[in-house]
Image (cartoon, grey):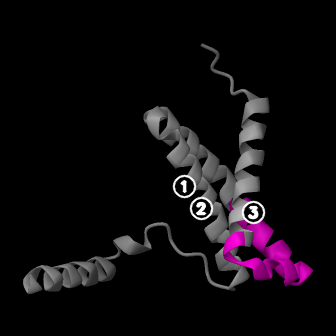
Amino acid sequence: MNARPNLARLDELGQRLADQAFRTLISLCPEIRSASPARQEAVCAAMRAKVAPSIDRLLEDARLAPCLAEAAFHNAVLTLALAGVEALQGKVVSSKYRSNSPTSNQNRKDRHAQHVHHH
């Protein structure tokens, strides 16, 4: 098996990922079309910043569970689109693990406990 990455296929994957991410972004935030060129560039820059780690994660996920490759691709698309949405809305990009904070987990546990208690 050839250990060298197939750069043409990697470029094709990157192009497909970018196309789907932009389509998703436009679907979620049609106002991107009327945003200033500076705002559009900020959105693109935010999305570009996530491309390499998203592709790395996609490839690793697909390697570990080939049956989930399509889901891994969609996860990468949504990761890029979310970066664009956050940049468009002027939000600070959220931490990947924000939901794992003790406060957040405790609130989630409390809500779950309340829900379970009522049943």
Query: What amino acid is labelled 3 in the image?
Result: Phe
60 left or right of 40? left
Report the residue marked by disc 3: 22
On screen, residue 10 above or below 24: above
Task: Return the residue at label 1.
Answer: 75
Q: Estimate the spatial distance between the alpha carbons at disc 2 and disc 3, rounded to whole Å.
A: 10 Å
Numbered circle sitting on residue 91: none
Q: Residue furthest toward the top?
A: 1
> First in sequence: mark 2 or mark 3?
3
Residue with the mark numbered 2: 78
In space, the residues marked 1 and 2 are separated at their CA atoms by 5 Å
Q: Main secondary structure of the magenta part?
A: helix
Looking at the figure, which quarter contains the N terminus? Answer: top right
Q: Earlier in the sequence, mark 3 or mark 1?
A: 3
Q: Nearer the viewer, residue 38 or 23?
A: 23
Residue 40 covered by magenta stretch? yes
Residue under the point 59% across and 61% down: 78
Residue type, numbered disc 1: Asn
Residue at left 48%, top 33%? 66
Is residue 11 found left or right of 58 in the rendered image?
Answer: right
The x, y position of residue 103, in whole percent, is 30, 83
**Which residue: 9% across, 81% down?**
119
Q: Find out whether the residues at labels 1 and 2 contact each other: C-beta distance under 8 Å.
A: yes
Q: Residues within 10 Å of mark 1 (few under 14, many from 20)?
A: some
Q: Position of residue 52 (x, y in %)?
A: 67, 50
Q: Is residue 39 magenta?
A: yes
Using the rendered image of the protein, determine whether residue 57 is visible from the camera's viewpoint: no
For disc 3, the neighbor class at 10 Å (few under 14, some 14 to 19, many from 20) is some
Three-letter amino acid code at the position of disc 2: Leu
In this picture, which residue range is highlighted in magenta?
Answer: 27-49
Q: Where on the picture, by quarter, is residue 106?
A: bottom left
Counting the numbered discs, the total is 3
